């Protein structure tokens, strides 16, 4: 029973996390705008805010899509976890743990979830898994 539920559980986790990251990246493009995101990054002391803001927006959109599809999971999971560590360092860490006070509880959960999903292999319903099945043994992917 557990083996049958695992691919569905991994799919649900990937999609939920992916949607969260995708929406946050989209907001940096469509709601705040890259100029607004850059100003915010500058105000919190992010180095090279003019480069970091669009890079993070792209990372969150592309990484969110990668999680949803189950593609390049170790790379996407690692980069998104690093993104959340940056959010803890620059925004949420000073507010303590509790999410109700803007603390790092939520972003820490996102970082852990991104790493966990990134290194589980994504399950049977992931693009990475499907590509491995179609690649002959010993061939580079």
Image: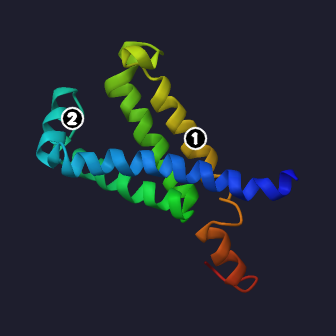
Return the residue found at the far bottom.
Answer: 136
Does 91 sit left or right of 139 as displayed?
A: left
Residue 120 can be seen, yes or no: no
How many numbered discs sit on the rendered protein?
2
Residue 113, image quadrant: top right
Does 135 sit left or right of 31 as displayed?
A: right
The residue that appears at 70% across and 56% down in the rendered structure is 8
For the residues labelled 1 and 2, say whether their Cβ atoms are less than 8 Å apart: no
List x then y, in percent, for residue 100: 41, 16
Return the residue found at the far right.
Answer: 1
Label 1 to label 2, Cα distance in Å?
Answer: 24 Å
The front one of 23 and 122 is 23
Disc 1 target residue: 113
Q: Helix or strand or loop: what does disc 2 sit on?
A: helix
Query: Mark on residue 133?
Result: none
The residue that appears at 51% across and 59% down in the rendered structure is 68
List x then y, in percent, for residue 30: 20, 51
- Here the colouring is rainbow
The residue that appears at 44% across and 60% down in the rendered structure is 65
The residue that appears at 44% across and 20% down in the rendered structure is 99
Above or below: residue 107 compared with residue 48: above
Q: How many other residues sit within 10 Å of disc 1, few (<14), some (14-19) or many (≥20)?
A: some
Residue 101 can be seen, yes or no: yes
List x then y, in percent, for residue 91: 32, 25
Above or below: residue 86 compared with residue 105: below
Query: Mark on residue 41?
Result: 2
**Residue depth check, mark 1 versus mark 2: number of the one nearer the observer:** 1
Q: Quadrant of the C terminus?
A: bottom right
Q: How many other residues sit within 10 Å of disc 2, few (<14), some (14-19) or many (≥20)?
A: many
List x then y, in percent, for residue 122: 65, 59
């Amino acid at each position: 029973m557990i083996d049958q539920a695992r691919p569905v559980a991994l799919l649900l986790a990937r999609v939920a996390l992916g949607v969260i990251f995708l929406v946050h990246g989209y907001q940096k493009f469509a709601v705040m705008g890259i100029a607004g995101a850059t100003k915010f990054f500058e105000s919190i002391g992010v180095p090279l805010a003019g480069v970091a803001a669009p890079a993070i927006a792209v990372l969150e959109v592309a990484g969110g899509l990668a999680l949803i599809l189950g593609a390049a999971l170790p790379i996407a999971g690692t980069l998104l976890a690093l993104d959340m560590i940056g959010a803890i360092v620059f925004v949420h860490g000073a507010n303590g743990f509790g999410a109700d006070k803007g603390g790092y509880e939520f972003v820490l959960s996102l970082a852990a979830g991104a790493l966990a999903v990134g290194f589980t292999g994504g399950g049977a319903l992931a693009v990475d898994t499907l590509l491995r099945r179609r690649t002959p043994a010993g061939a580079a992917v």
